[in-house]
Amino acid sequence: MVWHFGYCKVSIGEVYCVIMEKRKNVILVPGAFGYVPFQDTLERKLEGDIVRPDYMRGGKYLTRQSCNRILDDLANKGILDESSTVVAHSAGTIAFAKWLAANGMSIEQYIAVAGFMGPRGIKFDIKAPHYIPAFAALGFSLKENELVDAAGLVGDKHSFFSGDDSDHLIKLGSLERYANILGGKRHRLVGQGHLGAVGGVTEIPGIEDVIRGG
């Protein structure tokens, strides 16, 4: 939470005043391989608001245990609360939605980037078989009822994904399915791949405006 101080002028002179404005924390959740360039850009542009925990802790992949441990800690400390925005990428969208549904915490805003799910197994979603071990390392998959429950706990929901099937990892049908179940606004991008490091995507058009409420 951040309190802003403003400088006010009145007819009888100049006085300091306090503008009591509570700013939300923006929590980043990485994908299976860690943070990607667009999240680095958000951290730079929203300096002071961004919370970027170390989910990996020296490990190779994001796991169920590491994600739950970090999110529990953020919630217990009041950093993740009803006023928060969460921006999750790729497999992080599975991890966060699963955690949210299990904990029943309401949040102000959730932005899913390249979100996917696979109740019939992780192979249902992924185009490239050699990536399956990395995503499977999460240790769980997201069921439809869990995403429905998570969606009901979010005030403002957004999904950003490549709507032209340019995502080299996740099938378009799986991206659309996550977005449709989550609800809210769908931002269908063109030629952006998986919105990660491989495609060289350093910034997602419109995402900063969404976070700022523009």
Image: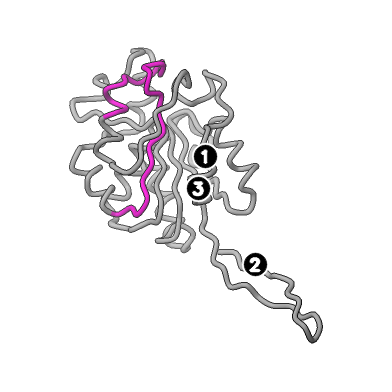
Structural distance between the alpha carbons of marks 2 and 3: 18 Å
Residue at the limit of the structure toward the front, as seen here:
11
Precedes in sequence: disc 1 or disc 2: 2
Secondary structure under the numbered disc 2 in the rendered image: strand
Q: Is residue 26 left or right of residue 166?
A: right
Q: Nearer the viewer, residue 177 or 94?
A: 177
Are dots 2 and 3 in contact, CB under 8 Å? Answer: no
Disc 2: CA contacts within 10 A as few (<14), some (14-19) or many (>=20): few
Disc sitting over residue 34 in the figure: none
Q: Position of residue 61 (x, y in %)?
A: 45, 30
Q: Label 2, on which residue?
A: 4
Q: Where is residue 175 in the image (x, y as percent from the top left)?
A: 32, 27
Residue 183: which quarter of the image?
Answer: top left
- Is 50 located above or below residue 196 in the figure? below
Q: Is residue 37 left or right of residue 173?
A: right
Secondary structure under the numbered disc 1 in the rendered image: loop
Of tags 1 and 2, the one toward the viewer is 2
Read off the magenta span.
153-176
Q: Where is residue 99 in the image (x, y as percent from the top left)?
A: 32, 47
Q: Label 3, on which residue?
A: 211
Structural distance between the alpha carbons of marks 1 and 2: 33 Å
Task: Residue type at mark 3: give it.
Answer: Ile
Q: Label 1, on which residue?
A: 57
Task: Residue type at mark 1: give it.
Answer: Arg
Secondary structure under the numbered disc 3 in the rendered image: helix
Q: Which of 50 and 121 is in front in this view?
A: 50
